[in-house]
Amino acid sequence: MKNKIIAFIGPDGSGKSTAIKYASFILKKKKIKFKVVYPFNYFILRKIINSFSNKKKKYYKNSKKKGIIKFLFPMLALIDAWLYFLLKIKSFNGYVLCDRYYDDLYTAYEEFNYGNKYINLIFLKLTPKANIKVLLTNTKEKLLKREQNGKHSLSFFKRQISRYNKLKNQNTYISLEKNFSKNDVFNLIND
């Protein structure tokens, strides 16, 4: 079996983990080989970022300040994305369930002022493609309530919903609305 990549995309609290839990249950029951991956966490860049952890905290405090690294970071992340994709995703024979995907990084770059409009669009257009992209949505109030680490505000979720809606208009996604069920996920897998 060739691999089938299903990317679950959406703001914090939109239900990505729940959808993946449903998909995992369905695939296990059908005895289909699968794995869950987290491409949002970077591959090699994570090690570099962690090695500069003290500088990182200082750098993030003023997120509007833009140096050359912050400007070019999406291009470094693009290289990182392709390495991860080729070494960890593409070589797997079975279903690959992605908890977040490169589209989510795109929205984060806009939020934290990385790159610019053109560099970020290049990043989005050149990242590895998934077979199915599932966009999960909800209201800003529900997202705030469901968020697990409590670090975002209502205005953050309003901006994120706006970004994901723009993405939805630019790309082909399958949408899972607010109160999706196991059946909704089952139908996704069987398409």
Image: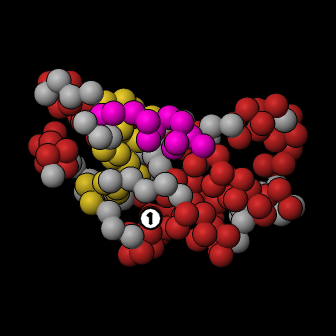
- The magenta stretch spans residue 183: no
Q: Position of residue 20 (x, y in %)?
A: 31, 37
- The residue shown at (86%, 44%) is 58
Q: Is residue 146 visible?
A: no
Does residue 7 appear in the picture of this structure?
Answer: yes
**Residue 52: quarter of image:** top right
Residue 168 x/y as whole percent: 38, 69
- Quadrant of the image occupied by residue 114: bottom right
Say whether residue 126 is left or right of residue 184: right
Stretch of the chain drawn in magenta = 83-95
Between 132 and 105, the residue placed more toward the observer is 132
- Residue at horizontal 86 percent and vertical 61 percent from the top: 68
Residue linked to disc 1:
164
- Residue 96, image quadrant: top left
Q: Position of residue 128 (x, y in %)?
A: 49, 54
Residue type of the residue flagged with mark 1: Tyr
- Residue count near mark 1 (Cα–Cα under 10 Å), binned few <14, some 14–19, many ≥20: many
**Which corner quadrant holds the N terminus?**
top left
User: Would you place residue 155 above or below residue 77 in this image?
Assistant: below
Colouring used for the render = secondary structure
Image check: 114 left or right of 182?
right
Label 1 residue SS: helix
- Which residue occupies the foreground of this view, 140 or 52? 52
Residue drawn at point x = 44 percent, y = 64 percent: 164
- Compared across the picture, whether 4 is left or right of 184 comes to right
x and y, in percent, of residue 150 in the image: 54, 40
| Residue at x-position 51% and y-position 43% | 85
